[in-house]
Image: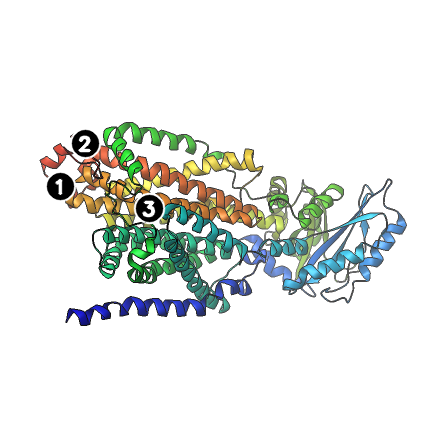
Amino acid sequence: MSNVRRPVRWLVPLALVVVCLGLGGALGPYAGKLGEVSTNDQAAFLPRSAESTRVVEEQKAFRRQETLPAIVVWTVTGGGGITTGQQAAATRSLLSLAGEDGVAGRPSPALPSADRLALQGVVPLRVDLGESLPEVLDSVRRAAAEVPGTRVQVAGPAATQADLGDAFAGIDGLLLGVALAAVLAILLLVYRSVLLPLVIIVSAVFALGVACALVYVLADHDLVRVDGQVQGILSILVIGAATDYALLLTARFREELATGDDRVRAARAAVRGSLGAITASAATVALGLLALLLSDLTNNRALGPVGAIGIVCAALTALTFLPAVLALLGRAAFWPAKPRSADASTGGHGIWRRVAHRVDRRPRPLWTGTLALLAAGAAFFPALQAKGVPLDELFVGGAPSVAAQQTLGRHFPGGSGQPVVIIADAAELTRVARAASTTTGVASARAVGASEQPGARPLVVDGRVRVDAVLTDAPAGDAAKRTVQRLRESVHAVDPGALVGGYTAQQYDTQRTAEHDRTVIVPVVLAIILVILIVLLRCLLLPVLLVATVALTYLATLGVAGLVFQHGFGFSGTDASVPLYGFVFLVALGVDYNIFLMSRVREETVRFGTRQGVLRGLVATGGVITSAGVVLAATFAALVVIPLAFLAQIAFIVAFGVLLDTVVVRSLLVPALVRDIGPAVWWPGRLARKDDGERAASTAPVERTGAGAPRQP
């Protein structure tokens, strides 16, 4: 009878692998198609309730046709200033573009700067150009290049959008390739196996394919919104999380396989042993991401469900597809290495036996020292200035649109091409225009005319008029944002119903909204994590300690990041959303490793008591958790291949924070705290009520043995 059942036992994992591979083949291409339903239109990611967002809606009524402005700027290449002939030639070159494919409306004439060293003109482009936008901009440059003795550059929203598209162009292939290459190299180094790293990579790619397919369908039906940043973070998040979960399950499978030859039994035992930790980890990260739905920033809200979908797919893959493959491969998965248990005298656990011995011998100096180290890093937290990234720092390494905007700022008012837009009552036009033009930091203010002819009457729509105010300072700088504050005060004093928006106002409102979001979302995420830890560990004191240590790690990471960004990378500011993104990723993912450790510690404590539980748990999980941390740090570090300041800042914060949490907090601080507190750490759970023998044993010295984890004499 057993001979009949034996082949049947292989049918379930075999069928599961076949189904998953077929599903992966069908859904895999969606990882490359997600860009078809993503948008990099920055106006789509503004604060929902902000004044500048309301301006975006109202100013549509003043456009005869919605356009994307391209600002052409000419600068003289020789001595002297702009000549009348050059200005006339520049105007002709712009007007020759009227009616060209992609050009919407009549371009403006070329106007000289006050120093007569530059000219500027505006070419309105269609907003629906998509991937053909760079080609249209090239046509504009070629036409403008006909002016002799000048150098031509293109700035403005159209040029910025084209550079953003170019920055995200490699997100489907380059980012994924770099991340997978980093993961594969680390896995080969850790396992010294040929087949297992490939199995884990296939598992992670399968999870990403399923996640991208689900997100594609939801985005195609306008249920979620995706931009290049969300798309990139989704890829990194799924690859990193899927690999982490795979490492945890594979480690348990290796332990089970080392005690017997039954591959199916070992796979089942591995799933049972890691189910709680993986489920709790996935729930922590997914619910933490879903807390972003409380944000008033649309791109934050977009990341919430998209990221949660990715995490759920990563966990399900690790608990289904991966164990099925391992059940079929057995020991061959680890070839040419041989699977060994965590308690074997060989197998790479010597360093963790030494760490456990140090934790056991001197727990209090260890946790006080590491705590002081984290506190020192956290003291520099104010150095992180989350006031937004200036336009000239938006792209790492620069971009053509940034260079053009800098040229424009040298010869024209800093806000040229990015005016502050004021929507006001038509009856108050004169007073509003006067209040705007006399505000400190405003170079000029004029009403939008009913026609494009100079001196045309103001355009009135439903009793409202539009006034464009050009600022003297660069549009995304601190000085310009302070001007927006003053402008709102002066304009609202004249017309309480007036609205002040535009690019600079959007940056200011985004910064203020991000600050508000942090005060709302941070406590919610901490509460979610605390509840999950209480349910998993069935106690109260330990979860509170774990959350506190991870929160302190976050503050220390931001303190170090603030110093590195200013003095290392040269960033004068940090994107307003970075602290919140960093918090969600670092706290949720940091708790992951504590979940992996403490769930094993609790398992060992049930059998051996708290002292031996924490030491055995540290030895058993040290290698796999460290490997997982390095993998996750490497995958997030891959974000630097996308040359955007926001992603570079996220990459550093998460990579550094994960390594800090893995190497210092999970390896030293948490085990030393638990060892020093003893059984009371499980209060008020049943494990806290050990008999006096366990309490006495917790203070007894520990022998180091060659057989594995430390043991009591």
Q: Nearer the viewer, residue 702 or 594?
A: 702
Compute the Cα span from label 1 to label 3.
31 Å
Mark 1 or 3, which is nearer the eye? 3
Q: Amino acid at mark 3?
A: Val
Residue 332, percent from left and from top: 32, 57
Which residue is at the far front? 336
Q: Which mark is residue 703?
A: 2
Residue for point 19% across, 38% down? 612
Locate residue 461 relative to residue 583 in the image: left or right.
right
Numbered disc 2: secondary structure: loop
Q: Amino acid at mark 1?
A: Arg
**Residue pointed to by mark 3:** 624
**Residue pointed to by mark 1:** 689
Residue 266, percent from left and from top: 24, 57
- Quadrant for the N terminus in the image: bottom left
Residue for point 31% across, 51% down? 248
> Which circle's residue, 1 or 2, is located before the other in the chain?
1
Compute the Cα span from label 1 to label 2.
25 Å
> Which circle's residue, 1 or 3, is located before the other in the chain?
3
Q: Nearer the viewer, residue 205 or 418?
A: 205
- Quadrant for the C terminus in the image: top left
Crowdedness near tag 3: few (<14), some (14–19) or many (≥20) residues, C-alpha within 10 Å? many
Crowdedness near tag 1: few (<14), some (14–19) or many (≥20) residues, C-alpha within 10 Å? some
Locate residue 551 relative to residue 401 in the image: left or right.
left
Q: Are marks 1 and 3 in contact (CB under 8 Å)?
A: no
